């Protein structure tokens, strides 16, 4: 946080300076009010004109200083907020796939929208007030020590008392602010779920139930915000009451002093100085608590989680012979998926994995592709432990074809090349192999046509073909294909599978569709059953036997 504030040093210094301008304004105001009381006592016209001129100069000066203070602060605040947004966004983008999947996507959206708004609304308002109040307190105290050191001492005692009271409030303020942030996250996730599933909700007339749940969530969220606001204003009011009591005591004391001969001007000066020391101070500590809660928000949205990728996992991925899975067991919390499986993938061969739904086919892909690494046993690539290989290097040489294909709002070409520099010819070759030409010919601008709204107008089959073209264009060494042909009709499914089988790459495909004359062209067919992986020979499978 400090680092971020000091990122723009020159602007930060100007910002600090601008925050103290109002102190000069305040002191000038105190002096003028005291002078006005002095006029009443002196009853002199020349003194009146003197004060009048000072007052006019003050008003002009006041306007200038107000505008200047704003101008100097605005650009710094804009820079900091921009850098916070970039940091928060970067943190999410830099996360490993595994880390990213620990939370719902909508939590990240909430961090970027709600939390940054909270920070924007509370941080700078509190910061300027803290600096201003602190500077005012110090300057007034210096003047008071010179004018009346006993009074200065009493006010200092009050400061210590208020500080101790505020310390008691600090923890609760921070934790209440965090609760608001979490409630915001939950609400965003829920709303997003409703929007995603709105079609199903409406078609089944069940939107009312969800609306009720959302309303409840709004009540919870607003309740949390309310608690936070009540708690912070409680602190302000509590401290302000202490301040008022001290001031009343002071006025009574000064009234006795007037009888003893102290002038109106001096009395007003003392009262104003004392209140200028007490009131900024009583608000100072609760504001520091608000600042601390903003800092907690800042840390939450910018601090990077410790990556599980250790120093060692930076070896390049090089695959020349075999990927060996040696006695791997894996469970999702309490749900065991694999019980000590053994098998090998051979370079250039075509592997088919079959098994009933929920058997663990997709999980097997995640194990092989680095997405899951908390398994027992080991996986090695030509003897090198997969956990030591960098995900980045691995992903350069591997391609995935899934059933759900995400399309970017970009040209068809960019969707296929994934923004890498391939020529139109290379893209067209990939498209031809993926059976995408008929679709491309129907487009006005061919592969340069822009795909909008996640390719709403593309059929399931066309989306699949885009995904296959991606893998072909990348010339991946290994292709993981998860049910890629399952949404295609038999004719297209056959021709795509034929293309896959002819690729010069290692293929691991999951498919529950079998096309006569095609499926048996795979070099190896594996079957997952009851947590074991076996070689499938079409008639028998040998449960639990290692390959
Ligand atoms: P398949 O692809 O063969 O249909 P999966 O590998 O997707 O099966 O899932 C295997 C089992 O693990 C299923 O019972 C599924 O419900 C469960 N599962 C899958 N992903 C997760 C997850 N992220 N957390 C917990 N359980 C999961
Ligand atoms: Mg699956």
Image (cartoon, rainbow, N blue to C red):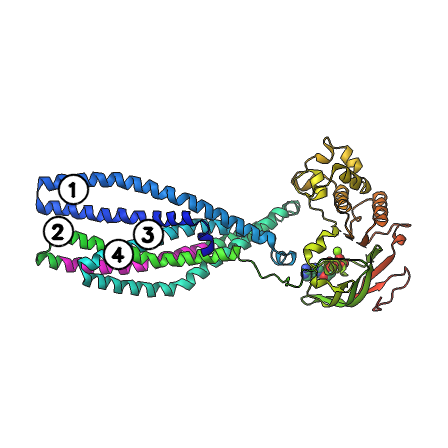
Residue at the disc numbered 2: 264
Q: Are marks 2 and 1 in contact (CB under 8 Å)?
A: no
| Closer-to-camera residue (227/373) | 373
Q: Quadrant of ligand 1?
A: bottom right
Q: Is residue 248 left or right of residue 379?
A: left
Residue at the disc numbered 1: 51
Mark closer to the observer (3, 2): 3
Visible residue check, residue 189: no
Q: Secondary structure at mark 3?
A: helix
* Dot placed on the residue nearer the N-terminal end, 2 or 1: 1
Residue 33 sits inside the magenta stretch: no
Residue at the disc numbered 4: 277
| Residue 163 in picture, x, y percent from top left | 33, 63
Q: Could you give the CA–CA distance between mark 2 and mark 1, rounded to whole angstroms? A: 15 Å
* Dot placed on the residue nearer the N-terminal end, 4 or 2: 2
* Dot placed on the residue nearer the N-terminal end, 4 or 1: 1
| Residue 290 in picture, x, y percent from top left | 40, 56
Residue at the disc numbered 3: 132
Determine which of the numbered discs, if any, sits on residue 176 in the image. none
Q: Main secondary structure of the magenta part?
A: helix
| Residue 374 in picture, x, y percent from top left | 68, 65
Visible residue check, residue 50: yes
């Amino acid at each position: 946080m400090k680092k971020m504030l000091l990122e723009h040093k020159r602007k930060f210094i100007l910002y600090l300076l601008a925050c103290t301008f109002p102190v000069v304004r305040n002191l000038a105001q105190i002096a003028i009010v005291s002078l006005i009381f002095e006029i009443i006592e002196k009853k002199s016209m020349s003194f009146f004109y003197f004060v009048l001129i000072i007052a006019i100069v003050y008003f002009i000066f006041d306007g200038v200083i107000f505008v200047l203070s704003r101008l100097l602060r605005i650009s710094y605040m804009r820079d900091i907020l921009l850098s916070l947004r970039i940091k928060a966004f970067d943190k999410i983008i830099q996360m490993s796939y595994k880390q990213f999947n620990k939370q719902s996507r909508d939590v990240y959206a909430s961090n970027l929208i709600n939390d940054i708004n909270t920070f924007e609304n509370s941080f700078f308002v509190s910061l300027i007030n803290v600096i201003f109040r602190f500077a005012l307190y110090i300057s007034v105290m210096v003047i008071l020590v010179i004018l009346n050191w006993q009074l200065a001492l009493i006010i200092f005692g009050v400061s210590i008392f208020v500080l101790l009271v505020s310390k008691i409030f600090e923890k609760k303020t921070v934790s209440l602010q965090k609760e608001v942030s979490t409630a915001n996250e939950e609400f965003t996730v829920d709303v997003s779920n409703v929007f995603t599933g709105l079609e199903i909700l409406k078609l089944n007339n069940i939107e009312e139930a969800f609306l009720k749940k959302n309303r409840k969530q709004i009540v919870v969220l607003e309740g949390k915000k309310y608690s936070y606001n009540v708690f912070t204003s409680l602190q302000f009011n509590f401290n302000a009451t202490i301040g008022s009591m001290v001031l009343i005591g002071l006025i009574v004391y000064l009234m006795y002093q007037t009888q003893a001969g102290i002038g109106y001007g001096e009395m007003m000066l003392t009262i104003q100085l004392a209140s200028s020391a007490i009131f900024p101070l009583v608000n100072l500590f609760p504001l520091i608590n608000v600042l601390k809660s903003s800092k907690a928000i800042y840390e939450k949205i910018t601090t990077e989680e410790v990556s599980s990728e250790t120093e060692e996992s930076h070896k390049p991925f090089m695959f020349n012979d075999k990927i060996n899975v040696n006695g791997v067991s894996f469970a999702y919390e309490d749900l065991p998926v694999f019980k000590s499986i053994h098998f090998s993938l051979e370079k250039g061969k075509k592997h088919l994995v079959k098994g009933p739904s929920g058997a663990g086919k997709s999980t097997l892909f995640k194990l092989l592709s680095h997405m899951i690494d908390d398994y027992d046993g080991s996986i090695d690539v030509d003897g090198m432990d997969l956990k030591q290989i960098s995900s980045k290097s691995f992903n350069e040489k591997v391609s995935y074809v899934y059933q759900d294909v995400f399309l970017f709002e970009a040209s068809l070409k960019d969707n296929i090349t994934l923004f890498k520099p391939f020529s139109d010819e290379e893209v067209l070759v990939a498209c031809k192999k993926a059976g995408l030409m008929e679709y491309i010919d129907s487009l006005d601008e061919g592969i340069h046509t822009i795909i909008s709204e996640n390719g709403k107008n593309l059929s399931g089959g066309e989306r699949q073909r885009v995904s296959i073209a991606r893998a072909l264009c990348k010339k991946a060494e290994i292709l993981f294909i998860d049910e890629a042909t399952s949404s295609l009709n038999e004719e297209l499914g056959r021709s795509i599978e034929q293309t896959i089988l002819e690729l010069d790459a290692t293929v691991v495909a999951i498919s529950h569709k079998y096309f006569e004359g095609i499926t048996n062209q795979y070099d190896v067919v594996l079957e997952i059953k009851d947590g074991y992986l076996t070689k499938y020979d079409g008639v028998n499978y040998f449960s639990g036997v290692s390959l």
